[in-house]
Amino acid sequence: MGKLFRYVGVYSTLDTDPRLPVASMIYSPSYISFGTALAYHQLIPECTHAIMSAAFRLNKEKYFDTPFGRYSFYYLPEAVFHYGLEPAEEGGYGFRLATQEKALCDTLYKIRGIKSRLYYLKI
């Protein structure tokens, strides 16, 4: 039997337990997005080391270092928070995941320096 991990009421004895479902247990409401969702959908070749999630009840970005890994939560406006989500499962545990399009839009929203749609037309 391996080490017993415990964090925010989540217990595990295996290092290989699912990591993505833990995000919504740490901070809710949230969903997996940004680079983590892009890698999940195989839209980027690299994997992300931190689990990146979107949340709307934040006044600043939050980070949690746990035995399950690093979890990052980024603000998105509540008006767009609930669109483009799909249910997903890892190791028998469910979680909310951004669709491919939503993860890309969330990522573009967080890029500093983009002020409007006109910025994209200049590229």
Image (cartoon, rainbow, N blue to C red):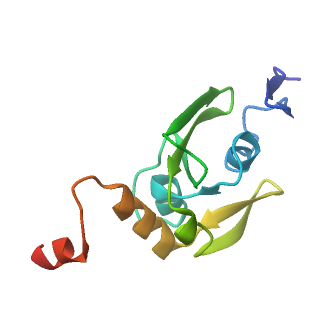
* Residue closest to the far left: 122
Q: Residue furthest right?
A: 1
Question: Which residue is depicted at the point 20% across and 74% down?
Answer: 120
Q: Nearer the viewer, residue 89 or 31?
A: 31
Asked where in the image residue 78 lies, by quadrant, the reply is bottom right
Q: Extreme top residue here?
A: 3
Q: Where in the figure is residue 44, as x and y percent of width and height?
A: 39, 60
Q: Position of residue 30 (x, y in %)?
A: 65, 54
Identify the residue shown where x is 76% and y is 44%.
Answer: 25
- Total labels: the figure holds 0
Front position in the image: 96 or 62: 62
> Going by the image, does 6 lie left or right of 70?
right
> Along the horizontal axis of the image, is 5 left or right of 27?
right
The image position of residue 54, as x and y in percent, is: 55, 54
Q: Is residue 8 above or below residue 85?
A: above
Q: Foreground: 103 or 109? A: 109
Left or right, 110 with respect to 40, comes to left
Residue 83 sits in quarter: bottom right
Residue 4 lies, with reference to residue 42, above or below; the image says: above
Where the C terminus falls, by quadrant?
Answer: bottom left
85 displayed left or right of 108: right
Please report the residue visible at 68 percent of the width from the left and 33 percent of the height from the top. 68
Q: In x, y percent, where is residue 85?
A: 63, 72
Quadrant assignment for the N terminus: top right
Image quadrant in which you'd find residue 97: bottom right
